[in-house]
Amino acid sequence: MHVDTDVLIIGSGGAGMYAAIEAARAGAAVFLADRSLIGRGGATVMAQMTVAVALGEETPDHWSHHLADTIQAGRGLTDERLARLLCEEGPECIREMDTWGVGWARRDGHITQAMAPGHDRPRCAYVDFLNTGPAVSKTLRTVVNRTSGIRKAGDLLIVDLVRHDGEVTGAVALHLSTGAPVTIAAKATIVAAGGLTRLYRRNSASANMGGDGYALALRAGAPLIDMEFVQFFPIGHLAPRLIGMDPIMWDPFRYKLGGRLLNAEREEFTERYGTREDGKYVITRDLATYAIIKEVEAGRGSPHGGAYLSFEHCSADALRAAFGPVIDRLAANNIDLTKMPVEVAPIAHYHMGGVVADPRMETEVPGLLVAGEAVGGANGANRLSGNAITEALAFGRRAGHSAAERARSGRHGFRPADARDAVALVAADGGPDLNTAAMIQTLQATMADDVGPFRTADKLARALATIDELAAALGARPAGDARAFDMRRIDWLDLRNGLMVARIVAEAALRRTESRGAHQREDFPGMLAEWHVNQRARLRDGRIALDSLPVAAAVAAQ
Amino acid sequence: MKATLKVWRGNDAKAGQLETYEVPFEPGQSVLDGLRWIRANRDPSLAIRFSCINANACKECMMELDGETVYACTARLEPREMTVKPLHNKKLVRDLVTEIAPPAERFKP
């Protein structure tokens, strides 16, 4: 099976859908591919929190203030060109979403903007109740559906990009519902496949965010940067078991109601680590993660190994006014916040690293663009809360525009011969019978235990040894068969990508002998001037090569 | 405590069979938790579809539990015998996976 298109977009989260809309508006024929349902997977639909954007609706604001906060949070490693794009064009995207009827929460005739940790003023727009991501996804799905020129293809897992003379000319995909290979010829390809949080046992993203976008770009010759910086969200839901709700749900509760973070002795403890809260939500993500993990290590953790988060001081009326129907969903899970605390613990949430891109969202490889969380550099060593959706929209829009421009002047360079190896991989039958599901669990456990927020040389070496063992067991022949929805085949392709990306995270973390932002080395505490550099990863002859380069010069230096 | 999951397996809607799995049970778990346990511990070839795991955001894990249409991520696992089957009114792909995407969002060569 074969498809011709101007612009291929891989991933239909916020970034992919905005890119599709923008490229189609610019006149390009768009092929929007997703391994799951269109606009249902990825991270955007999961986002229950806020969108940071300098609208100036709540108090006067300017994008330069948002940029200053973003750079401050990035601990010296932010690519300021990309951060500027996020902060400067974010407001236009958010206002366009408003005209499309997303339903930003309003008060007294203006869009409500909440205060969030790390921002110098109220800047974070949202949709009630815990509905920001679902509303953004639904709105973009609606606009994608009414925009002519966008062809949608769900259940299409991109296996490899195809190159000719160093240029990306399309891709090879596995059509999940038949098991057949599909070749796609494109004049421009946008990777909008999200981050890598699925590589961790407890995470807040979809099961389809296992680093495949990074692996696709890397194998096509594009470098990655800042891969050691995995953001952990400190107060992911831990216990009691809660179904039908995303584990990051407690953040909006804290924005609106404060809440108290308590240890096993029911004492507030963040002051011990430098931030006194007094029932307000002021502690930054990296510090809260540190404080909770240290309390648990000191034997003062909650029963399941986290901290308590308590809203017991809030009245039932106040809770219902703030979260309406969510209170009923909690009741269905036997949780009454006026009578009991919940347990929370850090959870893998976002990846700061990603593919090196310029402000046009073009990579070093002609024909290959990126958007959203797949892009590295805009958030440095630590992302400010609220920047992820803004980045998805602003980067998606820019990538769609650039890809359409390229498609207008370009010609198809796709040659079937260049796709032969990837097609053979998809079409291979009679693969080994591996327990791929257990292998993914082993990888997730290793990453959580040994490549989590707090790292040592010993733990990282142990993780690399496990990754080596898993890679040896995985082999070069895909497990399962080329038939409809063979999960062993899907897992095998995911492990092929995930193990490579996990290895880069661990190697970059081992090489960075300092502590900065989301990367904390217990054997190298403290930030060092000599490490005021980005680390870049390339694939050379099938092996990972890391080097260091001055901040924000990743593309300019080429 | 254990839950017993009888799971419909097959790639032809007219010729499948129920396979029985004993699954460790913890109060509060979802049916999807049980199915994921089977994949990692008994049979990785069991076909299920989901993206969001727990948030009821992706809407992919629709199936029939004891004859009723549910999302496996919000249906609770119980320490008894439970039967899960693919949606009977959607085209079967494999095991518990059916063609649920709107026609305009399916890949057509």
Image (tube, rainbow, N blue to C red):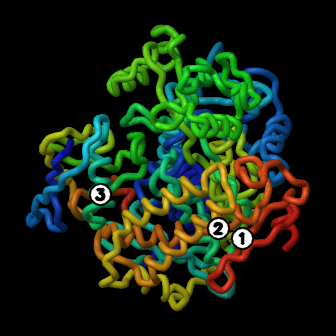
Q: Measured along the vertical axis of the image, is residue A26 above or below residue A65?
A: below
Q: Could you classify mark 2 by the number of other residues whose Cα lies within 10 Å: few (under 14), some (14-19), or many (20 or more)? A: many
Residue at mark 3 = B48
Give the image location of residue A24, x and y in percent.
58, 58
**As rendered, which of A424 and A538 lies closer to the eye?**
A538
Residue at mark 2 = A504
Q: Quadrant of the N terminus of chain A?
A: bottom left
* SS class, disc 1: strand
Q: Quadrant of the C terminus of chain A?
A: bottom right
Query: Who's the residue at 34% across and 74% down the image?
Result: A434
Identify residue type, mark 2.
Ile
Identify residue type, mark 1.
Ala
Distance Cα–Cα, label 1 vs label 2: 7 Å
Give the image location of residue A267, x and y in percent.
60, 20
Give the image location of residue A263, x and y in percent.
57, 26
Cβ atoms at labels 1 and 2 below 8 Å apart: yes
**As rendered, which of A436 and A448 lies closer to the eye?**
A448
Q: Measured along the vertical axis of the image, is residue A26 above or below residue A467?
A: above
* SS class, disc 2: helix
Residue at mark 1 = A537
Identify residue type, mark 3.
Ile
**As rendered, which of A349 and A339 lies closer to the eye?**
A339
Q: Is there one chain holding both mark 1 and mark 2?
A: yes
